[in-house]
Image: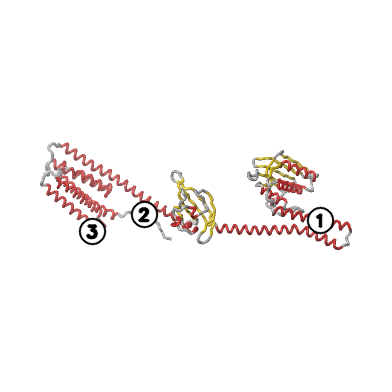
Amino acid sequence: MKDNTTNLHPPDITAQKTRSIYILTLIRIIFSTLIAGLQIFFNIGITSSKFQVLIYLWILTVFIVSILYLALARVRLIKKRFLGGLLYLQFFVDIILIDSLIILTGGIESWFSFLNILLVIAAAMVLGRRGGIIIATATAILYGIIIDLQFYGLIPVSYNASYRVTDFLYNIFVNITGLLLTAYLMGYLVSRLEKTSETLQKKDVDLRELSRFHSEVIENIPSGLFTTDADGRIYLFNSAAEKITGLSREEVALKGINTVFPFLPLPLLTGRHEGRINTPENEKYIGMNISTYRNSEGRVVGYIGTFQDVTAIIRMEEEIKRKEKLAAIGQLSSSIAHELRNPLASIKSSFEMLREGHLPSETRQRLMEIAINEMDRLNKIVTDFLTYSNPKPPEHGRFNISRLVDELFEMQMTINEGIQFQKEIEEDIKIVADQQKIRQLMWNLLLNAIDAVSGKEGRIYVSLKKTNAGVEIRVRDNGRGIKKEDMDKIFYPFYSTKEKGTGLGLAIAYRIVEEHGGRIDVNSEEGSGAEFVITIPPAPEEAV
């Protein structure tokens, strides 16, 4: 993998100093030419005509010195070792040139004393705080000497006779103070600027490193990633997204996200989304999560989406469901065969014995009763299986469930006199449901409770009441209970722990509850009886 790491190199000092020499030389030539031209053409500030020749010589000197600087800056040895000294030499020579110009243009009355300030500013910028103070000190000393020499008449530059000693002292004080303060302030500003520049350079490197890291992460994550604006236009599309969709980022840039994923609604909704897309290779199933992207003010400015190709997982799930269905069919077929084999064996044995023809009349009668009972059992198994496997849709109607439950309760209490029955049924509760299916549900639950307590003095408790969730029915017995390992199987078809049970009663009850959108819960421990709690919610408006 290509290493895109950005290293922080120290700045090229030699290149910076060489550039400073070129810039200073250019400024010197332009500025000196401009000022000298004004003096020559407009005769401003020249105290005597004899100084005009000296002005020409001054201009020539500036050009010669500038050319000499440029030549020295190109010498390899000086460029390598003495470039900093050459900069100091330039500034010291500039001090002499500026002060000579001040002498030529009137000394204390010269308009060009401000050039010393500009020189100190340039020195502080190029040489730093220390260099700026050195140049400012040298400039102040030389300027003070010039003004003193002018006052004492040691240089042939006249001045206004009204000037007193205090005027000269004030001029010297103001200029020296201004130069030193300028050097200090510029040095401070330059040092702060350098520190700020270094900090910005480091921050720039850090930001570029962070940006590169983010790019590497985005491009190398295995999930597809995209970002959009608030209107759903695509702005980012990583490599994994290109691979999954078969579309390049150039193809989808600024297009609506629903052109790539047709199953997405616009405007985008956050959360989980699933759907299919058609790629040049085949059809793919996509699983996607979308979240909002907010700016620093907390305002939603776009969306971020991550997605995966879940085609293999979906097909694996379909294959597992198919295998589970085949396994369930095989298990159901085995259970049916087992349930049918027992009564068929009894019937066959009875007819084989009857075929011999030498049995007493009483025995023949008994065998015929066995065959008929087993045929009835076969018919019941087939009927229950058809009820379970091919249920009719519920036919909703309003009826009084209190009356229905009470009737079934009284019927079972009459048939099973050896069992103690208790009831707690609220009166006049009406629901919208399939009355025949609810009757079948209650009948199966009561029969299951009666079978659980048969052969002993048992107790069965039935309650019916209205709750916030709908209608709640409870059927509780004190029978043998349900084993812990059987709790998950009691609603399976043909699963029964009873000798003569078909294993379809509870399965049918579960199917009826499910058809009405309700739930059935079981509370039981082995040896402590069982309680079935059925909740039937109000029917939907369309059913009503």
| Earlier sequence position, callout 3 versus callout 1 | 3
> Front-most of 140 and 72?
72
Q: Which amino acid does label 1 sit on?
A: Ile
Check disc 1 and report its element: helix, strand or loop.
Answer: helix
**Residue 495: where, in percent of width, then height?**
71, 54
> Which disc is residue 8 wearing?
2
User: On the picture, is 216 further left or further right than 188?
Assistant: right
Q: Nearer the viewer, mark 1 or mark 2?
A: 1
Q: Residues within 10 Å of mark 1 (few under 14, many from 20)?
A: few
Measured Cα–Cα span from mark 3 to mark 1: 127 Å
Check disc 2 and report its element: helix, strand or loop.
Answer: loop
Check disc 3 and report its element: helix, strand or loop.
Answer: loop
Q: What residue does disc 3 label?
A: 75
| Earlier sequence position, callout 3 versus callout 2 | 2
Outermost residue to the bottom: 356
58 shown above or below 161:
below
